[in-house]
Amino acid sequence: MDLMGSLPIRERATIAGNIVNASPIGDMTIMLMALDAELELASDGAARRLPLRAIYLGYKTLDLRPGELVESIRFRRRPGLLFNFEKVSKRTFLDIASVNSAAAIRVENGVIVEAGLSAGGVAPVPLALEKTEKLLRGRAPDAETAWAAARSAAGEATPIDDVRGSADYKRLLLRQLVLAHFQVLFGLSGELVEVPA
Ligand SMILES: Cc1cc2nc3c(=O)[nH]c(=O)nc-3n(C[C@H](O)[C@H](O)[C@H](O)COP(=O)(O)OP(=O)(O)OC[C@H]3O[C@@H](n4cnc5c(N)ncnc54)[C@H](O)[C@@H]3O)c2cc1C
């Protein structure tokens, strides 16, 4: 929590505001995207549900009708689901991310059976790394998989050069954050240090 905004911002900001603000680097948005959250939207008595992943159509462009409000946000609780969030910003505290990423992974019998992976700051919208999620399913959570996921994620990203860093730097950050998920969730460390040829 210390990595998100400042105390006054954390006291005032809402999660629906974070989602509808549609910043490509919203922290809660990235976490909820990895958890495959669903939005309940309502306007004038009409209600509908929409996966969070489906609401972003382009930079700051949302599939939200005039007057429609986010009434609630839900995601399924899955026993055994491991979750991690990583954020790199120019200043450690009180700063918006240069790149952030979340992972929600469930392993059964030594194999990844469920994988949610998202990243912010690497595309015009908060990005669900769907190709990398697919790549992860059915594989052991080992160093080889971590490197494959890190490279795949970097390939899915389309960052731009801006005040937070060059596109190349952000791609590198994303790769490192995906490796960090594996380090935190599966206790890998030494295996992740060396870049295989
Ligand atoms: C100094 C500072 C630091 C910040 N640091 C961070 C940070 O570290 N991480 C981060 O993610 N963000 C950060 N932010 C951005 C911002 O505070 C957050 O995105 C926050 O969650 C926005 O929530 P809000 O309730 O203030 O939304 P608002 O700014 O009030 O609203 C944003 C948009 O959402 C719409 N909206 C709000 N609620 C709903 C709803 N229920 N249904 C439909 N539309 C709605 C509003 O109409 C508006 O268009 C920071 C901002 C500042 C000023």
Image (tube, helix red, strand yellow):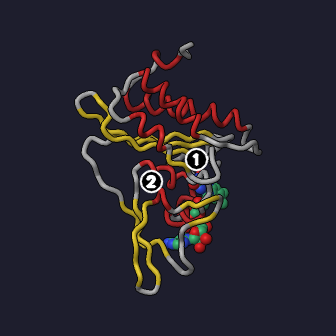
Q: Nearer the viewer, residue 193 or 54?
A: 54
Q: Return the mark for residue 143.
A: none
Q: Secondary structure at mark 1?
A: strand
**Considering only vertical position in the picture, is 23 above or below 44?**
above
Callout 1–callout 2 Cβ contact below 8 Å: no
In the rendered structure, the answer to whether residue 30 lies left or right of residue 171 reads left
Q: Quadrant of residue 89?
A: top right
Question: Which residue carries the number 1 mark?
Answer: 120
Crowd class of label 1 (few under 14; some 14 to 19; many from 20; radius 10 Å): many
| Spot occupied by residue 182 in the image (x, y as percentages of width and height) | 43, 29
* Dot 2 amino acid type: Leu
| Spot occupied by residue 76 in the image (x, y as percentages of width and height) | 31, 55
Crowd class of label 2 (few under 14; some 14 to 19; many from 20; radius 10 Å): many
* Dot 1 amino acid type: Gly
Question: Which residue carries the number 2 mark?
Answer: 32
* Rendered-image quarter of ligand 1: bottom right
Q: Earlier in the sequence, mark 1 or mark 2?
A: 2
